[in-house]
């Protein structure tokens, strides 16, 4: 596998190298592709790096997001209602890549839409669009032959979710075949619910470090700049999702449509979060 | 596809039935899924577990239930002899309790202190609430808001039994969304919670263990028909939503090559209308709720809402073993619409004095189609999976009767 891993995840490796140079953690922001509509979503996406996002996670909408809380479920529903589908998600990435060659984009979601697209064709189209990696919630290492192995062979990163339930016995299996970074889900639960304590994160980081040299991003339950800063003291990156898509929800008019405030409310929050993350270790 | 020597050896160690099944779940759940798999293996080889199971099945559920010769329906149709396996006579009125007894005993073995479940028609919810009351464990049942409206007697039953019924308002507000919500609860409460899945679907080992717990249906039926007729039936038939009563009936017969195996799916308003729940007849393989199986979805892999008059069949997927049995040709699956099921509901009530659940009314409807074409020397054995009392409001509404 190792010869393949070197392939196309330059952007992620370069970004973490740069963060290391700057002596700070990164901010990973999540939005759902097509939320609240494809055009507004593209506007938001384009503005994220300037607002302080170091890495972008772009959700692939799905009707049955089993591991997501209400905020991201609703984001998915808004996107689907606005006619979003996988090919449009990939063209969103392509449009972004035309102007930004450095910010890594990770597609995040569930397996079925990829499986139905066709794994080989999806990987080809995703790589050509400028996608750097995948996070697929419902593919544990037991199902690596499905997508993980083909993804890594294609030169994209397959980023693994690890959880509070991933103990020393389980972790060696989890860091196999993985690349880019490791995503630590800091609380057992759905996105946007409770948050982990500092001590819990410190303990988990130590556990993960025993098993991998990859950068570690910590997510789930991070809602404020202060929380992001706390995480940024320990981890290589902090991931924020539900809080950002909740801003989108908040910005909509009474018919659920985007307003002229939608993009700016999102970038405003991202700026605050980035400030928290960037000043955390000062 | 080549025919295997035995149809009863799957799943493989990774939970696959051919191309179907598997463990498509969030990593947070994986350690627990593996723990459950081990606990089930241990329980299977422990005579004390079997003894306990048998005790409760006999004294609490009321097994063995009869295999009943539906004489007047047979005469009416003028063809094959029709037998009903009377799961409707179980405590709580349906087959669901067989599985719940098995799973709650497993939960206790694993030291879990809280039970969650999803329910469609409410039968599985009632069965789960029942065993939770019996074994003194707190119980939360997730039920689609749409199903809560159409199955209010079962909602009240669950509450009487001490369960908390949580309405699910996300998605299509029916069974699939209740399952999503139960999975969300489980991932949040992995430490103390056991998820009693109601059908032979979900991540491995659920399809296997639910099948095994429901196989008591087929094991008894096989002995009973041999006793009654001195031979095996020509056809066994059951309705499939997720498919737990069907796989429970089918599995002990799968290696009896002379027995034809028929599953009946809900065709709702008709397959051509797109408003149905016939995932095997009109769906394609995909991944949802922990397993690969036939699903109803669009070209983008988005799951479609199922539609059936029977809340228990109103699910856009099917247990993975059925998908395998279909593809390999060991079983055939036939669609039956709402109207045909309603007619069968009435005919069975009037001719046999048995008000059947709307779920198994679908298989009665298929029998009404097929039995007259079969000779009088042929035998059909059907799983009458539950009683229809819970459905009288739905049926009354469909017939335009005000109660």
Image: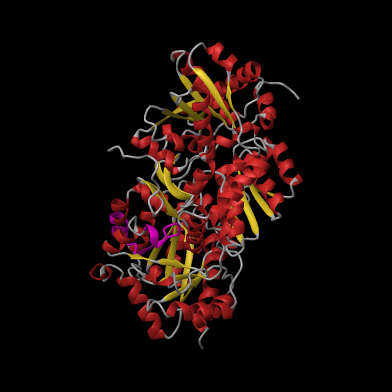
x and y percentages locating residue B272 in the rendered image: 45, 26
Residue occupying image coordinates x 62% and y 61%:
B112
Residue A78 visible in the current orientation: yes
Residue occupying image coordinates x 58% and y 81%:
A199
Figure quadrant of the N terminus of chain A: bottom left
User: Which residue is nearer to you in this view: B337 or B36?
Assistant: B36
- Magenta includes A129? yes
Residue A261 visible in the current orientation: no
x and y percentages locating residue B34 in the rendered image: 47, 60
Q: Is residue B290 above or below residue B251?
A: below
x and y percentages locating residue B152 in the rendered image: 71, 37
Task: Please identify the quarter of the rendering in which residue B75 is found.
Answer: top right
The magenta-colored residue range is A124-143
x and y percentages locating residue A255 in the rendered image: 60, 48
Residue occupying image coordinates x 39% and y 66%:
A159
- Magenta includes A257? no
Q: Is residue A262 above or below residue B160?
A: below
Q: Is residue B105 above or below residue B28?
A: above
């Amino acid at each position: 596998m190792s010869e393949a891993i070197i392939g196309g995840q330059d952007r992620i490796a370069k970004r973490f190298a740069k963060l290391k140079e700057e002596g700070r953690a990164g901010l990973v922001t999540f939005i759902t592709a097509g939320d609240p509509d494809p055009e507004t979503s593209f506007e938001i996406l384009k503005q994220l790096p300037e607002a302080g996002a170091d890495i972008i996670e772009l959700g692939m909408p799905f009707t049955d997001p089993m591991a997501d809380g209400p905020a991201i479920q609703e984001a998915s529903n808004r996107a689907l209602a606005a006619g979003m589908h996988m090919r449009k998600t990939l063209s969103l990435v392509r449009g972004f890549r035309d102007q930004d060659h450095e910010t890594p984009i990770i597609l995040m979601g569930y397996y079925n839409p990829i499986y139905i697209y066709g794994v080989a064709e999806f990987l080809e189209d995703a790589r050509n669009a400028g996608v750097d990696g995948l996070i697929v919630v419902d593919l544990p290492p037991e199902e690596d032959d499905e997508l993980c192995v083909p993804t890594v062979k294609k030169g994209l990163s397959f980023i693994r979710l690890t959880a509070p339930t991933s103990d020393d016995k389980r972790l060696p299996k989890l860091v196999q075949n993985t690349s880019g970074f490791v995503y630590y889900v800091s609380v057992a639960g759905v996105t946007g619910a409770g948050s982990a304590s500092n001590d819990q994160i410190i303990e988990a980081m130590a556990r993960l470090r025993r098993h991998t040299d990859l950068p570690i991003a910590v997510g789930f339950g991070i809602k404020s700049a202060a929380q992001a800063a706390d995480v940024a003291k320990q981890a290589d990156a902090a991931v924020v999702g539900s809080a950002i898509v909740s801003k989108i929800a908040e910005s909509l008019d009474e018919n659920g449509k985007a307003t002229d405030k939608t993009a700016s409310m999102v970038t405003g929050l991202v700026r605050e979060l980035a400030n928290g993350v960037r000043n955390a270790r000062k | 596809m080549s025919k295997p020597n035995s149809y009863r050896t799957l799943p493989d160690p990774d939970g696959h039935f051919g191309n179907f099944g598997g463990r498509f779940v969030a990593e947070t759940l994986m350690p627990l899924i593996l723990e459950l798999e081990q606990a089930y293996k241990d329980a299977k080889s422990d005579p004390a577990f079997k003894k306990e199971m048998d005790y409760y099945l006999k004294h609490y559920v009321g097994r063995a239930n009869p295999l009943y010769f539906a004489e007047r329906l047979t005469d009416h149709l003028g063809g094959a002899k029709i037998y009903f396996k009377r799961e409707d006579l179980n405590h709580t009125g349906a087959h669901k309790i067989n599985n719940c007894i098995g799973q709650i005993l497993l939960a206790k073995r694993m030291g879990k202190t809280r039970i969650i479940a999803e329910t469609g028609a409410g039968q599985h919810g009632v069965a789960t609430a029942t065993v939770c009351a019996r074994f003194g464990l707190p119980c939360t049942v997730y039920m689609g808001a749409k199903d809560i409206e159409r199955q209010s007697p079962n909602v009240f039953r669950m509450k009487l039994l001490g369960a908390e019924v949580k309405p699910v308002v996300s998605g299509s507000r029916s069974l699939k969304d209740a399952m999503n919500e139960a999975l969300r609860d489980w991932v949040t409460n992995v430490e103390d919670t056991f998820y009693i899945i109601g059908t032979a679907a979900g991540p491995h080992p659920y399809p296997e263990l639910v099948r095994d717990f429901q196989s008591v249906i087929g094991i008894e039926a096989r002995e009973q028909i041999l006793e009654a007729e001195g031979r095996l039936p020509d056809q066994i038939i059951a309705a499939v939503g997720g498919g737990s009563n069907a796989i429970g009936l089918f599995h002990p017969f799968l290696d009896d090559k002379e027995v034809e195996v028929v599953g009946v799916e809900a065709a709702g308003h008709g397959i051509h209308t797109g408003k149905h729940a016939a995932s095997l007849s009109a769906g394609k393989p995909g991944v949802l709720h922990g397993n690969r199986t036939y699903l109803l979805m669009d070209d983008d892999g988005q799951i479609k809402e199922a539609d059936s008059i029977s809340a228990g069949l109103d699910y856009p997927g099917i247990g993975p073993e059925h998908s395998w049995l279909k593809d390999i040709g060991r079983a055939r699956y036939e669609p039956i619409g709402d109207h045909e099921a309603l007619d069968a509901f009435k005919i069975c009530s009037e001719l046999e004095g048995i008000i059947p659940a709307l779920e198994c009314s679908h298989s009665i409807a298929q029998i009404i189609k097929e039995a007259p074409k079969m000779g009088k020397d042929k035998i059909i054995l059907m799983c009458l999976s539950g009683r229809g009392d819970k459905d009288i409001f739905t049926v009354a509404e469909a017939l335009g009767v005000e109660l």
